[in-house]
Amino acid sequence: MINVAELTTFLVYFVLLLIVGYYFYKKTSNIEDYLLGGRKMGRWVTALSAQASDMSGWLLMGLPGAVYLYGVNQSWIAIGLFIGTVVNWILVAPRLRVFTEKTNALTISSFLEERFKDPTGLLRIISAIITLIFFTIYASSGLVGAGKLFESMFSIDYRVAVLIGGAVIVLYTFLGGFLAVCWTDLFQGSLMFVAVIVVPVMAFFSVGGSSSIFEAMSLKGISGSLIPDTALPLVAIISTMAWGLGYFGQPHILARFMSIRTIKELPASTVIAVIWVAFSLFFAVLVGIVGIPMFEELAGGDHEKVFILMIRQIFTPWLGGILMAAILSAIMSTIDSQLLVSSSALTEDFYQKIIRKEATETELISIGRISVILISIVAMLLALNPNNSILGLVSYAWGGFGAAFGPVILMALFSRRTGWQAALAGMITGTLVLVVWERLGLGAVMYEIVPGFIANFAAILIVNRIVKVNEEDYAELFDAFRQEVRA
């Protein structure tokens, strides 16, 4: 039976998002506005947009579900992500902001081509292909989350729920581009932050505190220790903490660094982002822990609905509807970013690079909007299987970006000795190792991002020794960063 209060809350929320999309539709006049907001984003918008687009539905559904199912040792994922977030903001953000502006790059693919002075165009084209593949998988994970949310709330068919959620996300991303995505992320990130703290705290007291939690863990045979209950606990810890390596290669997060108004805004933005992610990850883990005594065994993939069930059990329908909207916020804030970056890859790196180099600004914006629709259709088709796991899909896509782009981005920003041949070899090697590792089922032993990331770095270092580059070719770019920092 449909709950009127929850339905009303969601309809109001949808209308607000569409208003924002239409408003920024009027503000978007060129391709730089559509893809990067004209590089004029403030510290708060940049910080909350980066983190909201980062965490997605897995923060409120996938991570709590894993903790509910397997215990406290899943917290190593959160610890690894926190460390990765801090390092990414401190090391990568300032250099990427300066380097991408100096190279006039609007996408990561175009940045890699310009930074490494690739005369073949292969770096740009292959990185764009990798972006499209893994973002389509990533976006489908969000649509799985939307399907499970709407199915639980409105008792509608899972597949219909996926299509409804996808349609709303596509519409406001289609209209407003990067500006709409970032400003809605500011609101959505704030709502997520409030919900992920309020819900588990209220639930903690409703179940009777820590004693009830430990008792329920004991009865269900769930470990309350951070040490994984496996034959190789250290390998398990490294595998889960390795999620943090993914940050260096996530195009939708890196795009936020590229869009901030000035490098001088980054220290304040970093503080905001780190506080947001520290609280959000801690309380998301707490959701899973408190869910153990609150609910009996959840069948099938229902363990990823623990946050939804918690809200329904504790809060009134009206307040619950607002808190449920936070889950939708988490889902939408990531999918919209992924659609936009994928659209950027098709528009900038394929259409303008290969098909029509003389395309006008208006034409490029139109192609960008058409690309959003095409990518969303593929993602929705992938998401129609109700047996898909949110965490499983996110894990593969996140690992794919980390293994393909992470080492290449780091070398682009910190090494003058790396040429385009080494960057291309690293990108291809890291991607292939990740895919083969996962296909062989070795991901159960070690998260595939680890061998992929290592193989990428190894390939770069080997080719660097074979193919020598003139470091002076890159001196101007590195010197520009020093001047920006000193200014």
Image (cartoon, rainbow, N blue to C red):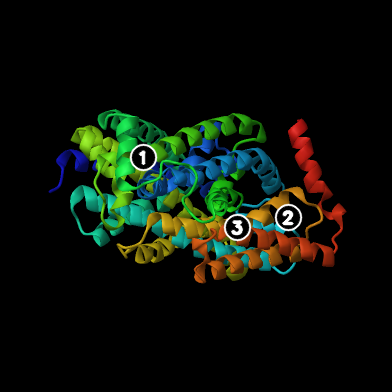
Q: Earlier in the sequence, mark 3 or mark 1?
A: 1
Foreground mark, 1 or 2? 1
Disc 1, SS: helix
Q: State the CA–CA distance, disc 1 to disc 2.
A: 46 Å
Residue at image point 33% right, 42% down? 218
Tell me the kind of residue under disc 3: Val
Q: Which mark is residue 450?
A: 3
Q: State the CA–CA distance, disc 2 to disc 3.
A: 26 Å
Q: Position of residue 479 (x, y in %)?
A: 81, 42
Residue at image point 23% right, 34% down? 314
Q: Position of residue 412 (x, y in %)?
A: 72, 53
Q: Residues within 10 Å of mark 1 (few under 14, many from 20)?
A: many
Q: Which residue is mark 2?
A: 115
Q: Nearer the viewer, residue 480 or 139?
A: 139
Q: Residues within 10 Å of mark 2 (few under 14, many from 20)?
A: many
Q: Which residue is mark 1?
A: 289
Position of 301 with respect to 472 (left or right) is left
